Image (cartoon, grey):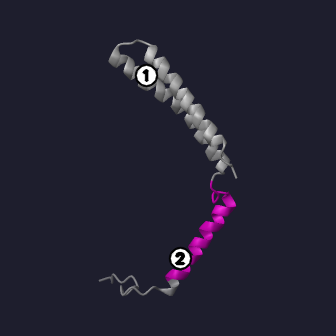
């Protein structure tokens, strides 16, 4: 009958061979990340650009959705839709101005 012994005694003591393999694996993963260029986080300017794009899309769309819901509720055809959409555009531009005042480093 085969023994189910994994080589570890379960007392919480670490095996020097496993620690060495773990360090080698971490070093290999880091070297591969550097080689492929996946170890860098996106630049802050790129993140700011994505935030601006999100504001440009979500502001008018959110305002139009809320306006449409109020139009359906109060039966005021396109009036509240237009008002809320323009308010959404104004809020989006205000947020874009705040984003553009941040330093992109």
Q: Nearer the viewer, residue 98 or 60?
A: 98
Image quadrant containing the N terminus:
bottom left
The picture places residue 7, in percent across and down from the top left corner, at 41, 85
Taking the magenta stretch, the answer to whether it contains residue 22 is yes
Tell me: residue 37, above or below residue 23: above
Q: Is residue 18 left or right of residue 29?
A: left
Residue 29: which quarter of the image? bottom right
The local crowd at label 2, few if under 14, some if 14 to 19, many if 20 or more residues have their Cα within 10 Å, is: few
Residue at position x 54%, y 32% from top? 91
Tell me: residue 88, above or below residue 8: above
Tell me: residue 58, above or below residue 40: above
Q: Is residue 86 left or right of residue 34?
A: left
Secondary structure mostly taken by the magenta-highlighted segment of the chain: helix
Q: Secondary structure at mark 1?
A: helix
Structural distance between the alpha carbons of marks 1 and 2:
57 Å
Q: Which mark is residue 67?
A: 1
Taking the magenta stretch, the answer to whether it contains residue 51 is no
**Disc nearer the start of the sequence (1/2):** 2
Residue at position x 60%, y 41% from top? 50
Q: Nearer the viewer, residue 38 or 86?
A: 86
Magenta range is 18-41
The picture places residue 88, in percent across and down from the top left corner, at 51, 28
- Residue at the extreme left: 1
**In this rendering, the label closer to the viewer, 1 or 2:** 1
The picture places residue 9, in percent across and down from the top left corner, at 37, 87
Residue at position x 57%, y 72% from top? 25
Would you name the residue on which mark 2 appears?
Answer: 22
Q: Secondary structure at mark 2?
A: helix
The local crowd at label 1, few if under 14, some if 14 to 19, many if 20 or more residues have their Cα within 10 Å, is: many
């Amino acid at each position: 009958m085969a023994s189910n012994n994994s080589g570890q005694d379960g007392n919480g003591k670490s095996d020097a061979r496993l620690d060495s393999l773990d360090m080698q694996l971490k070093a290999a993963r880091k070297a591969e990340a550097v080689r492929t260029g996946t170890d860098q986080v996106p630049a802050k300017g790129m993140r700011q650009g994505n935030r601006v794009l999100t504001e440009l899309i979500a502001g008018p769309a959110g305002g139009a959705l809320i306006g449409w819901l109020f139009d359906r509720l109060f039966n005021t055809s396109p009036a509240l839709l237009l008002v809320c959409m323009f308010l959404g555009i104004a809020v989006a531009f205000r947020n874009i101005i705040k984003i553009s005042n941040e330093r992109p480093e």
